Amino acid sequence: MLFNTLEYFLFLPITFLLYWSIKNTTTQNILVLASSYVFYGWWDWRFLFLIFISTVVDYFVAIKIEKTDYKERKRVYLLLSIIFNLTILIFFKYYNFFIESWVELLSSIGYHVKDVWTLKIILPVGISFYTFQTMSYSLDVYRNDIKATRDFISFASFVSFFPQLVAGPIERASNLLPQMLKERKFDYKQTVDGLRLILWGLFKKVVIADSLSLLVNPIFDNYEILNGGELFLGLIYFSFQIYCDFSGYSDIAIGTAKMFGVELRSNFIFPYFSRDISEFWRRWHVSLSSWFRDYIYIPLGGSKNGKWVSIRNIFIIFIISGFWHGANFTFIAWGSIHSVLYLALVLSNKNRRYLTSIVSKNRAVPTFIELYQISITFFMVTISWVFFRSGSILDSFLYLKKMLLNFDIPISYRSGIFYVILIIISDWLNRKDERKPLNISSTNIRWIIYVLMFILIISHGGQKNEFIYFQF
């Protein structure tokens, strides 16, 4: 079920009213679980089995890990969880990629395979998200960061919580599970804040991202016959399309959770105002970046065992991050580019300059230095998006090569500039708190903006495009 459909806007109020008419936490969680399975099964009910079996395995594995006193046995149970979840993920997402890559490798050395055993596999929506979420639970129990729960309904609700089930944020059991276990009370202010986030997220997705997609798709599909200016604009537009699409989903997810008395983690913190690549990765897809940091980078030694170990670990993290996004060498190239950009900061000891500071916190406009840093960072990130969006590495290089030639921008492609300027201005005004958009003191102005946004969402709502990150 898509957030930007009529079905969802029938599903949400019905679930909301039923949920708050129930006073018992266990019964609320049963409703959450049932609603989440309806929400996910709307795409294909057959994939509900994957979520259910993943839930069952990690529920019992975590209990076994906690109960045993033998460290080796704990590791065996943890390994069971990791192998099971990665097997599901690899089979559905990467099986054909590995087979086809192996065949191409053999062909390159003169051995041609006649019968290639590939499968017509449908990628389950959100599989990369919920497998990481259940794995992190087993890992946290193994590390004694949390206790294993015996409440299966609450645990299953944590795994399948519908607002963030298919595209994040990737929640930690330490944050979401306690909220599922405790009593939740209706909070009017929390609900209003949630509705604002939903409205803002829908606006970013339906009005901005989907409008930009109408320009981006023809440009990338026909890059061979377009000039450099058109390709440059297409790349800029894609940067804002993917940002508004994915952060819009996260806003809707966080806002919907608020309506049910649950607080999810922030996932995007105005990443295009980052002053270097390191800050960008602390602001872009925060739940995934922090997952890789806590469960792969730090266990591998992090940055505490010398520069070479740190360099190795950074390469591993970014390549895995690229591969997580899709079964294509373009994503690996995209991750590798970011690893090189990040390493440049690490080697110069500048990767921790902007840990908490907000750009131009007490100023209306950025300084010249800040504007320069933001522009350079955005340029590097945007160039790397070519590899993320293109169908092959060759297409990526050809796109970049053609972008340098015959630089002219026809009027027909300039319409997207309005949407880019709109999101930049709105993000700049809201940059002190990503969870409180449309926080305008004047009630009259606020409601005028609400109505205008709603009208624009309705007028742009005919496309019903899926969110980009559903494919991951």
Image (cartoon, grey):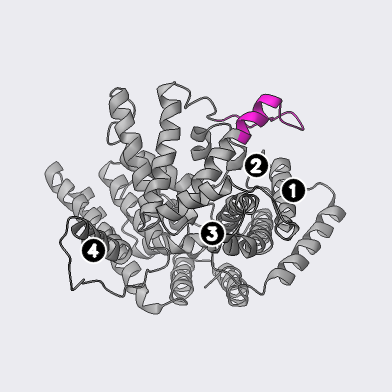
Picture coordinates of residue 412, whole percent (x, y): 73, 61
Which residue is disc 2 drawn over?
433
What's the CA distance linking mark 3 and mark 1? 44 Å
Circle count: 4
Give the image location of residue 8, x and y in percent.
Answer: 58, 73
Instruction: Give the amino acid at mark 1.
Output: Asn
- Element marked by disc 2: loop
For marks 3 and 1, the one nearer the N-term is 3
Q: Mark 2 or mark 3: which comes first in sequence?
A: 3
**Amino acid under disc 3:** Glu
Dot placed on the residue nearer the N-terminal end, 2 or 4: 4
Q: Residue furthest right?
A: 444
- Residue 106 in the magenta stretch? The answer is no
In 3D space, how far apart are the residues under numbered discs 3 and 4 (Cα atoms)? 30 Å
Three-letter code, disc 2: Asp
> 10 Å neighbourhood of mark 1: few (<14), some, or many (≥20)?
some
Q: Secondary structure at mark 3?
A: helix
- Which residue is disc 1 drawn over? 439
Crowding near the residue tagged with mark 3, few <14, some 14–19, many ≥20 C-alpha atoms within 10 Å: few
Location of residue 120 with respect to 155 vertically, above or below: below
Q: Earlier in the sequence, mark 3 or mark 4?
A: 4
Q: Which residues are magenta?
A: 356-375
